[in-house]
Amino acid sequence: MTAVSKRMAHSFRLNQVSRKAEAAFHLVLGLFSLACIVPFLFVIIISFSAEDSIRRIGYSFVPAAWSTDAYRQVLSLGDALWHSYFNSFFITIVGTLVSVTMCVMYAYPLFRRDYRFRSFFSFLSFFTMIFGGGLIPTYIVCKNLLHMSNNYYALIVPMLVSPFNIIIMRTFFQTSVPFDLIEAATIDGSGEYSTLIRIILPIVKPGIATVSLLTALAYWNEWFLCLLYVTQRELYPLQYLLMEMQRNAEFLARNSSMIGAAGADAIRTLPSQTMRMAVVVFIVLPIACAYPFFQRYVVAGLTIGSVKG
Amino acid sequence: MKKMLALLMAAMLAFSALPVLADSPVEISILFEGCNVTDDAAVLEKLNPYLAEKIGVTIKPVWGTWGNFDDLAFNAVTTGSDEYDILFTCSWTKNEYAPYARKGAYVRLDDPDDNLLAEYGKELTEVLPALLFEGAMTEGPDGQKGIYAVPGFKDFATMNTWDVNVTLLEKYGYTLDDVVSAGFYGWGDIFAAVKAGEEADGRVFYPFIFEGAVAERNVIGTPIVTGDANSLLSYYMNVEDVSVPGVYGNTFVNKYATPEFEKFVRQMRAYYEAGYIDPAVAIGETATDAWRNAQNTANYLISSEVSLYGYEFTTSEQRGIQVAYVMTTDAPYIDNTSVQGAMMAISANSAHPEEAMKFLNLLNTDPYVMTLLNYGVEGIHYNLNEKGEVEFVADARSTYSPWTNGVGNVTLLPPQKGQGADFQEKFAEFYSGSKKLPIYGFTFDTKPVENEIAAVANVKEAYALSLFTGAVDPETALPELLAKLDAAGMQKIVDEANAQLNAFFGN
Amino acid sequence: MKRGAGIPGGAKKTFWLTTMMLPATIWLLLIRYLPMFGIMMSFLEYKLPNRKMPFPVNLLHSPWVGLDNFSFLFTGESLNMIRNTLGYNALWIVLGLVISVTFAIMMSEITRKFMAKTYQTLMFFPYFLSWVVVAYFLFAFLDPTNGMIVRAQKSAGGAVIDWYNTPVYWPFILTICSIWKNTGYSTVLYLSAITGIDRSQYEAAAVDGAAKWQQTLHVTLPHLKPMIIILLIMNVGKIFNADFGLFWSVPMNSAPLFPVTQVVDTYVYRAYKSTGNVGMSTAAGFLQNLVGFVCIMAANAIVRRLDPDSSLF
């Protein structure tokens, strides 16, 4: 291509990168994306592989025999499975709503340069990212003082505030909210809350979508809180159901020489590898379904931003 | 308005007074471990009225699993929580008996001032063998020895064995005697013949699949030293007669520094390089899976097992082959590890230690309570056949299966299908022939050398399994390990342990 | 006085803004600050609480042992794990930053938004998965008897690599795993920052004759700067903390790999498992906090000197 035609192409493409460059982008991103998804497909294939096939040819993208045994085993968990499915959804939805509300309410004044106690509250939250009291004192405070034991609070409250998300949210305010807007609104007599809700929130939608996504993911994948505070099976989230299988297997492996023959029986009744893979599929599927929904908001935010410009 | 308030106050007072009414039974919360219980309603419905009537107690079990084994009791003990009145404890994993007793987490049961055992546990002390209580003696916070938990009455002696697939062995013209007489150092030819034969059709076969640490114990003859959770020390048994000391006398040695150990790992290396050992048993996370899988699918020639009486009947049937267990000592040996393997302690934070003791007493002496708690309700979870043996109802059992050894006195249980009506008598007779190790009763207190142990354990962890299974070359790895152990303070640990052992024998 | 101080409202404004902070503040005080007294456990020989001395009274009865609980972190062996922790973190901070910013910019330049969206969705996927699951993926390939790669090597007649016993490959494997799992996440962060940029700025730059890469340099990157800097500072603060799951599960806890897989967190965990000493693990956590604090303060001070607006506090 000559310099002239290059410039022509350039102007035709309305300030975009060249086709060649874009092709290269597609190649790089495409390959990486493929690498990201292939192992999950592999897990699905393994979850549908017959145990016998795994024993004979190992893990393979093309198993010698297919089987739905693993899923039949998972479904035979019955109530335990559906309870924990419900719990996971409940915890994720309630947790995300409360957590994101608190996050936005905390991040907004931090972004207001005219707020008096800004640096104090900044420090108050960021300091906890680096310093903590450790597991045992936190456990005692939550359990003895706040009575988080065998209830939904225990699975929601300890993760409500994430200083990291506060920082992300504050950064979003900084990069996308023009300060004059607040000034104008205040002069018009708008209260602080109504300014935030009516004027600011619509602008930072992409930020809220991002923070919601991160929070929801964190709640969905959480199992350690359940290990700490919950012994009632009706309260197990799905993730813990899987972790428990995993931890059962690990414990028996580590201590088999101590448990002896009784352990051999326990190991024999452990869920098979394929069944664990099937549970992984059960866990990942809802996220995979919900993610594009979140993404739409991110994209919607994008269009609003560019229309405004 | 005032009247209303007064009425409200009166109502509240009445409510708060309710729990102390004399007739209502006391609820005892119990932490069991290693269970798979999702539905205990049927059991509690039968059990609680019975307990209430007999001893004025009802129970609220918390069914710990293997997965939270390390955490539930640990959290309760370290935070001083009163949520459990009775806690499972043992000499292994994080919910350890001796250190917690020393730190004051449990009620002393034979306290001279308040002897719960004598007062509420009389039947219990008559039923359980005296040697169990002997093994349960440990130091309390006051430095005095006492009993801090009720030991479980189970297979209380250790049997380290080689698990031999006799069916496969005989297919190649060998007998069990050949395996026994050749011994660990002479199995090369047998392995070679069986491997060649089994691989004739092109598949991969590993004749020797075992648990690294148990193989070491089998070959060298070293029991677990109680308190030495990281397996740093060796005490050499006399495998011809486990009741007298072995070649090194009554001392502890650095496990990795003896000529016996070097000979063992060199042989393992030879077997590994010849392709007799499955490489998967050398990788921490896959070792147990590979080993148990090979056993369950009868895909091995020789394996290892910490076995118990009558186990070959069970496994032969399960695997569809003839299994033999070759004991590596002259008799099952009694050590703290086997005696303290599963115990029930009363929490120092419990508000009802007397009631807890009453319950433990009944649990260990009343077959009805023990069977109900362990096997569930007859007609729902199991049925008795005409021989009086238990046959489980698979569906109901899958929602209610506690870990039998973790509950209490297993000798109260009816026999399971295939064991025969006289199983418990045979079981008891077999274990009455077991012998006490000379160091029985000794517990290594690691507190004085805790810093060294933290460092040494990390070093040891990096080498032990690979050496035990032949995955690394001892020519280079062994000197490396010894040098690093030395630098991390191994000698100090060995010296401390020996000083404690001397004090133990001096007493 | 900074811009914006001119907003009227005074005490009333401050009051209303403060009420917004209340819910999270109460949470922080209760669940983050209150337990901080536990730091003192680093210096104590922890005595178990009981009925006569419940927590935290038992802390008063626990003897002071000074720095004893810290010493296990500084034996001959520990130098190696400190090197691993700092080395991997430093490498991954830089690598992660470069890759995810590059990917975010690439994505924002793709004309077919549907494709960009697809890439983004796919790349975020690994972030959902726990390390345990990732470990099994890897094992499916590297398993010494059944792994796909091992089978392929065997059938090709080549030498079979004993992956789980050969440390040299693992710095690369761990790096790939870390990038693979985390890139999608940070790409989304940067991408949403890019979407917040006013398009007219690009058009103005284009009118001025700036080529696309120049626009990236002069418009996109300056806009990403606050976020890059914040994420950098925060990562630097965690330089002495390792992702436990990655270093524990992914190498399958294989012992011969320890020289390249042992990091502070796994070392402390193994030491904790072997001693059950609460004081020691609290001490290790405290030290990690301290190092992180110093690093974050240093990084923040440097940033503040260079560009006061971007500093964290």
Image (cartoon, rainbow, N blue to C red):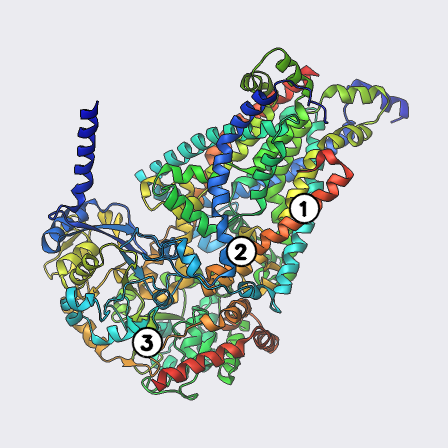
The answer to whether residue A54 is left or right of residue B348 is right
Q: In terms of secondary structure, where does tag 3 sit?
A: loop
Q: How far from the left and from the top, in percent, is residue B109?
A: 24, 67
The answer to whether residue C244 is left or right of residue B429 is right
Amino acid type at circle 3 is: Asp
The circle drawn on residue B494 is: none
The circle drawn on residue C248 is: 2
Residue at the image point whose x is 59% and y is 62% from the top: C257
Which residue carries the number 3 mark?
B335
Q: How far from the left and from the top, in percent, is residue C115?
A: 64, 28
Whole-angstrom CA distance, mark 1 to mark 2, is 30 Å
Which residue carries the number 1 mark?
C297
Q: Nearer the viewer, mark 1 or mark 2?
A: 1
Give the chain of mark 2.
C
Tell me if residue B331 comes above or below residue A277 in the rendering.
below
Residue at the image point whose x is 69% and y is 50% from the top: C91
Residue at the image point whose x is 16% and y is 46% from the top: B20
Q: Do dots 1 and 2 share one subunit?
A: yes
Depth check, front residue: B485 or C304: C304
Amino acid type at circle 2 is: Trp
Give the chain of mark 1.
C
